[in-house]
Amino acid sequence: MRPLRRTVAALGATVVLTGLTALPAAAAPAETAAEPLPVGGTHPVLLLVDTSGSMGDPDANGTPKIEGAKAGLLAMLDQLPAAAEIGLRTYPDVAGACDDGREVFPVARRSPASMSAQIRTLTADGDTPTAEALDAAGQSLLAAGYEEATIVVVSDGESTCADPCPVAARLRSQGLDITIDTVGFALAADDPAVDQLTCLSDTTGGTYRPAEDAEELGDSLAEFSAPTVEVELAADTSFNPAAQSALTVTATVRNPSGQLATDVRVDLRFDGSGAPAVSAPLKLLGNLAPGAEREVSWVVHTVDTATSGELEYTVRATTAGTQPVEADGTVELREGLDRADGGELFADADTVVVLGDDLSAGTGAGDESGDCRRSPASYAVRLFGEDAVTTLACSDALLADHADGQGEELADLDAVDLVLLTMGGADLGLPTLLAGCLGDLGCDDGTEAWTQELGALRPQLEAYYRSVLAGSGAASVVVLPYVAVVPRDVSAAATCAAALPDVSVDELARAAWLQAETNRQIAAAVEAVGGDRLFYAGEVETALLPDHSLCEERPWVHAASAEFGTLPTAEGQTAVAGALLRWAARVDPPLVEAVDPSGPVLVEVGEVVGDVAGDVVGGIRDTVDDVLTDAPVLDLDDPQDAPVEVSAGRPVTVEGSGYAPRSKVRVVIGGKTLAVGVADEDGDVKILVSIPAEAKADSTIALAGLGADGVYRLLSQPVTIGDRPLWGGLTLAVIGAMVALGGWYTLRVAGTRRRLTRAPAAA
C-alpha cells in the first residue's frame, strides 16, 4: 500500500442552521386495467329526437327539417358497428301535450333493415316536452339493466314543458352513468334552446353541436356513431443520454365519440438511425368508454443511442373498425454532464471534496499523478469541474488510515458543500480478489472466509462514516458503491465466462457475489448510521451494465490482468458520473428539522472534546438560547390584519398547525424559501428563521405544505421589515466570536489529548 500523507488536525464543533427546499418527484403514471363491456356487449346509444311541429319547417336549404333528421339518422345507422346497441325515442307522442314521447324501437343490437324502415315513418307534430321525454328515456335504460349509456338529443327548439337540465342530474344520481350529446338543429345562436341543450351536455360531460341543415346534421350524428380515439403526448422535449438512464414517453388516449371504443391498442416507435429500441412498444388498453381517457407510459433505455441531435418518435392508437391515428414527437439530445440534472443536492454544491480509494481518485481513467494516482478524469471532476473539486482520495486507501490522513485534511478545509466517497474495498483486498477470479490467476471458493471479513468490515465502515460526518460540517455525504464489472444475470453467466479467457462460470459467480455482498455491507452501514446528511447512491453499482462490462465488446473497465484491473476507464468514470446524476435527481436534499427555539441550537460535540471543552461549548449554547428565546413569534394560525413589524437580520419564530404529521413545511418570504421544517406528530410546526436583509419592506411570510386533509395548506402574515437593529448585529457578532472561541478551544483540547495519547508510542 502506498503511504498516505499524515498531517495533524482535530475534529471541531459545528453550528448548523440551514434550510433547503425539497420538491417531491413526480411519480410515473400507472396503466389502468381494461374496462369490461357493459350490458348487451357494447355501450348503448339512445337517440332522442324532437318531432314537434316546428320540425316540419324548412332548413337553410329549403328541406323540411324532419326529412333532414331522418336522413341523418339513416346515415348514422349505416355507420354504426355491427355489434352496436341503439334505440330511438321521439317526442311528443300526442300533439300539444307534455307527455314523455314514444319508443320507436327499444335499445337493441343494430338491425339496419327494420330500424331504417321505422325511421322513415317519422312525422312532425306537437310541442317540445324535452324534459319528460329525457326522463322516460333514462328510466327505460335503467329498467333494461344498463348502468351507462349515451343519449343523443336532437332538437330544434326550447322545451315547452319542464326544464330538462335537472332531469340529467337526477338520472345520474339514480345510478345511470349517462353522457348526453346534443345537436341544435337550425337554431339561432341566441335561441334559449341552445342554453338548454348546452346545459344537458355540460352536466353529463357530453358535447353540443350546432347543425344548420340536413347535411350538417348527418355529419354531427356520424361523429357520435363511430368510435374514435385521439392521442395527446406529454413527454420531455430534451434528454441527456449521459446523465439520464431512461427516456419516458407518456401519451393520453381518449375516446371523444359517443360509442364504446373496443380493443384499443397504442404503440410507440422511434425513427431514424441511432434511435433506441423500445422493448415493449405495444400497450393493450382494452375498451374505452365514450368520453373516457387513459394515460400510458413507456420507459425507453437509451444505451448506445445517438448522443446529439434529435430523436423522432410516433405514437399510434387504433380501435376496432377504424383507421389508426398518430401523434409525433421530437426529443432534443443534450451532450455533456450538467450537475443541474442532479437536482438540488448537486445544483448548489460549489465546494466538493472527494474521499476514499482508487475509484474516487479516478485511478485508471488516465493522466494519473502522484503516489495517490489521482486522475483529472474522475467522476467527480467530470461532474463538477476541477475548480470545484478537492480530491483527497488515494489509491489503495484503507479505513485505518483515514483519521491521520484524509480525515485530517478534511478538517483543515473551509466550508464544504458536498462529500463524495468510496471506501472499504482495499481493506477486503477486493481489487486483488476480483483480478484473481476474473483473470488468469483464478480464485478458490472462499465464501466462508469472505463472509467473516465482510461482517467485520461493517462496524468499521459505520465508524468511518460517523467520522466523515463529524469532520464535514453541514455538508451532505454521498457514499458510492463499487461498480459492478460483470453481469448479475445468471442467464448471462455462461456467455460472459466464454468471453473472458481462463474464467469459469463458478469463478464469475464468485466475483459477482463478492462485489455485490461488499456493496450490500456498505449500504447496510450507511443505513445504520442514518441521519439527514448521509446518502447511498445505489444506482452507481450498475453504471457499466448491461453493455460495457468486462464481457462486452466495448468494456468501460480495465481487464483484470492490466495495471488498473477491474477499475473503470475514462468512459467508465463518465458512466459513473451519469449514474450519480440519475440517482441525485430522485433524492431530496437534507432538510433542517423543525426548530424549537427553547431547545439547544449547537450540535453535540464528540467524546474527543472532553468535559472541559464541553463546558465551554455549553456556555456558548446557553448564551445563544437566551437570545433566541426572546425572538418574536409569528403565529400564522392567528394572523393579524395589520402588518407585523420585524427586523432584517433578527431571528423570528414562525409557527402554525394543521399540516400532515411528519410532512415537510416551507417558510417563504417574497417567493423565497428561508427554511424547511418538519411538522410534528400533531401536525404542528415551529421554525426559527432569520429575516434576510434584501427582503422588501412590505412582504408576506408564509408557511406552505401538505395539509392534514391532503390539500395544499398556506398560512400567511403580512409583515413590515425594518432596518437591521444595532443590538442584533452586535449580538450576532458576539455569538459568532464565542462560537469561534469555543471551536478554537475544542481543537486545542483535542489536539493536546491526541499528543498526550501518542506520547508513549513516540517514546
Image: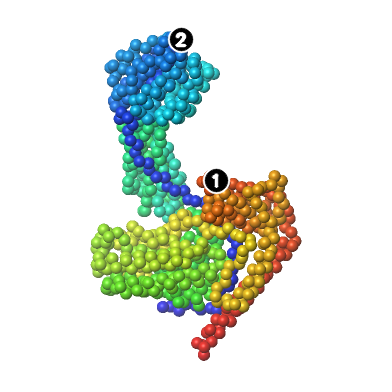
Q: Mark 1 points at which residue?
A: 712
Q: Which residue lies furthest to the bottom in this view?
A: 763
Kind of residue indicated by mark 2: Gly
* Residue at the image point whose x is 36% and y is 62% from the top: 556
Residue 685, x across and y down, in percent: 59, 54
1 or 2: tag closer to the N-terminus? 2
**Frontmost residue, 707 versus 645:** 707
Q: Where is residue 384 in the image (x, y as percent from the top left)?
A: 50, 61
Circles 1 and 2 in contact, beta carbons < 8 Å: no
Mark 1 is surrounded, within 10 Å at the Cα level, by few (under 14), some (14 to 19) or many (20 or more) other residues, namely few
Query: Which residue type does callout 1 highlight?
Result: Tyr
Q: Nearer the viewer, residue 733 or 105?
A: 105
Residue denoted by label 2: 96
Judged by depth in the image, the label closer to the viewer, 1 or 2, is 2
- Residue found 46% across the figure and 27% down from its top: 170
In the displayed structure, 255 sits above or below 25; it is above
Viewer can see residue 165: yes
* SS class, disc 2: loop
The image shows residue 462 at horizontal and vertical percentages of 45, 70
3D distance between C-alphas at marks 1 and 2: 55 Å
Residue 217, percent from left and from top: 41, 18
Q: Which residue is drawn at 50% across and 71% down?
A: 467
